[in-house]
Amino acid sequence: MKETPLSNCERNFILKAIENKERLDGRQSYDYRRIKLEFGIDRGCCTVELGETIVMAKVSCEVGQPKQTRPTEGFLYINVEFSPMAEAHFEPGKQTEQANEMARVLERCLRDSRAVDLESLCIMAGAKVWKLRVDIKILNYDGNTIDASALCSIAALSHFRRPDITVSGEEVTIHSVDEKDPIPLSIHHLPLCVTIAFFHQGTYCLTDPISREEKVMDGKMIIGMNKHREICTLQMTGNMLLNKEQVLRCTNIATVKIVELNDVLQNALSADEEARSSGKPYGTYVADFRKVTVKAAESPTHSMSEIEEEARSMQLDSDRMEESEEEVVENVVKNSWLLRIKESKANEAQKVKDTICSEIDEFLTTQREMSDLQQQSIVNNSSKNNGAKGQDQDAKTDTKRKRNQNRPKKKPDTQSTAKGESLDSATSQTKKSKGKRKGK
Amino acid sequence: MDKDSIFIPGDIICPADNNYISGNGTVTRKNTIYASIAGKCNFQKIEDGKTVVEIRLKNSHNQNIVPTIDCLVAARITNVNPRFCKCAIISVDDVLLPESFRGLIRKEDARATEKDKVELYKSFRPGDIILARVLSLGDAQAYLLTTAENELGVVSATSESGETMIPISWCEMQCPKTLAKENRKVARVHKDYIINSLVTEAE
Amino acid sequence: MAAWELLKDQNFRLDGRKPTELRRIETRLGVFPNADGSAYLEQGNTKVLATVYGPHEVKGGRGRSNPDKAVINCQFSKSAFSSSERKTHMKFGRNSSETNQHLVQALNAAVMSHLYARCQIDVYVEIVQSDGSDFCACLNASTLALIDAGIALKDIVTCCSATIVDEKSVVDVNYVEESSGSAVLIVGLLPKDEQIAYMQMKGRLHADHLEKLLDCAVEGCRNINNILKERIGEHLKTHSSHFTLTRPATPGRAERSRPAIA
């Protein structure tokens, strides 16, 4: 299927809004969308949600022969796939320019900057090394897949554990997970990417563009950096011309954003570690599955309260930055802090909504059991009576079933007024928060 | 501004005031004429007393010209269809193209009058050389051309016997050998451009 | 190779250059008679050939044609004998297609593509000998080939690489300096307005050093620009006997008024 091009009026609208320093989703120029990082049950599986963009990465490893020119180094392959799930015009299996570009940027960011120690992947020099493979799949496309993928892949690599090995002479034994605990990879630093999009021949720049903004932009600058302010990769794409000052301004913006992204990553990793070590349920898929059968609503895999404190401390840190950039930086941090407060409120509302859902599920199951019992009794009765009457009975059971289905909706109101009030207010709260998020 | 000086793309030639107009190979930006190709600069005076500034490439036939809207092109008919006819554009203005572009003449664009009663097979035949004007850039397949002017149409055609035909009227051409008349949409070429020797031979 | 070996005392590099010194550049335009434009460029031991065909009709599918501007198509190829070890490079592999995209991006900034709407310009680049700064040599050679083909350009694009060795920025890196693992910055510049059309960095570099490195690369681009201009001027002077004035001058297409339809 072919991609529908953006209409001229949409294009003009977005460009004019950017001139007035406004964005389609109400963000500030340097704000990121809501980031959600979740790990799976398997080690090395990570999903990142950056607004509507959803990216999933999975790390796997196998043993192979090293290159002849580098006998003590392992391999790190990065494969990016734009699935047609993400957007209808992506063709399955076809390696598009976009996927290619992304894979190369990530390779430079992770491999060429020596984020992962490839020498530690050596088992037997010249004979056997570990070949790491990061498979990234774009599940939903709404712009800025590079930032999301970079975050996702480094998170997956940090999360991954490779099997332990013992070398005895010429023999190499790879221990399974039951025999020996798998060991983490040796990661020197955590490079993350920041994408800055340019508009109006480089006059205005925004971070984290959504897909509509990407269609309108002149070009973008991708900066890969770690929290020690070391630039891991830098790339300019698109048809635009920049001067030196713009390039340096981008690196300053990137410095601030990297710190925020790093916080999200660290919190998610530590929360997952905690969950795994303390025996609590971990991994997104397990948590979702349990929600239906077990009543208790699970807490999200990373807490927002820690992030607020970090943001406050970061604000103090940012005061120490250069005077010329102070204004910009302060605004950026304040806005992101406000965003986090909004997020925490939304999460609370989400929690209450989850409890409502689980309770409704319970009522439905109990009602279904009751209606089943009723049906059985009716069936037993009808088997005694005539067949013609049975039809009427079936109609009666249908209406009874419908009535039963309607009942659980009424029940919470009648049961306890206090609960009913809180539920109503909670639902209205969620509606309001939803309205805020999807606001103009 | 020396006539013998070589210019490279991006070099400033002269300010763009009323006397100087940018010509081929130059571009005007912010009241200055810049060179956009590498070559020697040429100043030529035209009627209004103004000077046209242009840059000449080393070989004139290497000039990169491309059909643009409203330019005059010469094309060779390749296909004739009841609805449209396809042709290969061989020259633009008077510059021969190294590689032909594809052009399309729709039925309604073949003639200026009685557009609905046009029969393309009576206007063009494959192999004819026509003069046409570019209507639009068309689609990815072909440029859209028109011959709906008196001066546009078939310039040279060969008859069924293989001889170059002589135009008789705006809609007929005659073979000098067999004297058979064939229907074409003939271009009214200015008499200065007609090679008189051909006409006298036939007579 | 350890970084300290690259910059010995008295500030000389391994090949005897000073840190801000470029390698020797040799150029030749109009190398192939068949192509519309061609060029051969040598930057030290890196030797590159570039040919340009066009502008001609868009080939390869109806989707590629753009009614507003020309489509530039680049094909980058590295010969198997170009490096010290014979190695066949995949023409359609990931690295080549990335280089193709980047060449297209950099050339799009220079070519006045609105003059060649709905047409395609092909640029073919072949690395004959590779000794570092391959991409820079490719971009410089492509610019020369475009000039030879007479395609209208806003300004010539020059490209230069730079790296940091011992806290000193070093321009025009060769193969040894590239493979030492230090950060290499490649900048494609439009020298007149000092605008960066293309930029790429590989390796790890502290953000404080970026400005220094950028300045060094931009200075290198400026120097290459001066050298290329000289060479183009020389080439045109020796071939100036071919200048013919067969056509009377006409005002440019933009100024030409619409003729009245008879």
Image (tube, coloured by chain):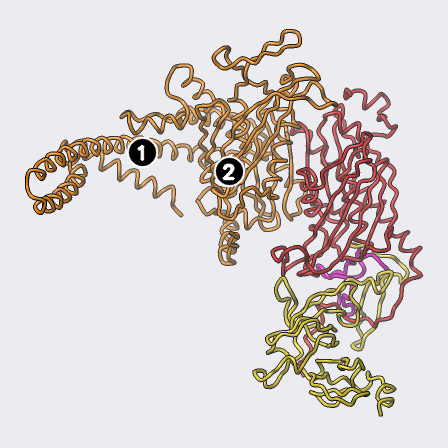
Q: Is residue B70 left or right of residue A346?
A: right
Q: Which stretch appears magenta?
A: B11-39
Tell me the chain of label 1.
A
Do we see residue A180 in this rendering?
yes
Residue contact between numbered discs 2 and 1, judged by CB atoms under 8 Å: no
Distance in Å between CA atoms under marks 2 and 1: 29 Å
On residue A138, the disc is 2
Chain that is yellow in the image = B
Residue C44: x, y in percent? 86, 36
State the residue in front, C8 or B177: B177
On residue C69, the disc is none
Q: Residue at x 81, y 20 (%)?
A: C5
Do we see residue B1 in this rendering?
no
Q: Is residue C54 left or right of residue A202?
A: right
Q: Amino acid at mark 1?
A: Ala
Front label number (2 vs 1): 2
Q: Please, what secondary structure does the residue beneath circle 2 have? A: strand
Q: Amino acid at mark 2?
A: Ile
State the residue in front, C4 or A113: A113
Question: Which residue corresponds to mark 1?
Answer: A349
